[in-house]
Amino acid sequence: MPERVVAKLFRNGRSQAVRLPKEFRFRGEKVQVRRVNTGVLLEPVLDVEDWFAR
């Protein structure tokens, strides 16, 4: 899997969204979003079962 690719930004209503390439998709329906330096980091939100499996 490549470490970096260019992804497309688009508008979804009044929000900005990013179309993730297939190899970067997350399982589930939610991600945590936080600012990191000049960028944004997306991390999966673990459900209860995943949390205790860590």
Image (cartoon, rainbow, N blue to C red):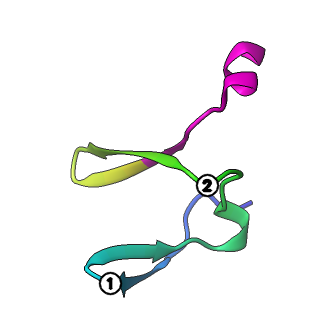
Q: Is residue 43 magenta?
A: yes
Q: Which of the numbered marks, if any, corresponds to residue 29?
A: 2
Q: Which residues are magenta?
A: 42-54
The secondary structure type at the circle numbered 1 is loop
| Cα–Cα gap, marks 1 and 2 | 18 Å
Amino acid type at circle 1 is: Gly
> How dense is the environment of label 2, judged by Cα within 10 Å: few (below 14), some, or many (20 and up)?
few
Residue 25 spot, x, y in % from top left: 66, 61
24 lies above or below 18: above
Q: Nearer the viewer, residue 10 or 14?
A: 14
Q: Nearer the viewer, residue 11 or 9?
A: 11
Q: Is residue 51 magenta?
A: yes
Amino acid type at circle 2 is: Glu
The quarter in which the N terminus is drawn is bottom right
Q: Earlier in the sequence, mark 1 or mark 2?
A: 1
Q: Which of the numbered marks, if any, corresponds to residue 47?
A: none
Tally the numbered discs.
Answer: 2
Residue 2 spot, x, y in % from top left: 67, 62
The quarter in which the C terminus is drawn is top right
Q: Quadrant of the rendered structure where residue 18 is? A: bottom left
Q: Which of the numbered marks, if any, corresponds to residue 13?
A: 1
Q: Is residue 47 left or right of residue 42?
A: right
Q: Residue drawn at (22%, 53%), measured in percent from left and top?
A: 38
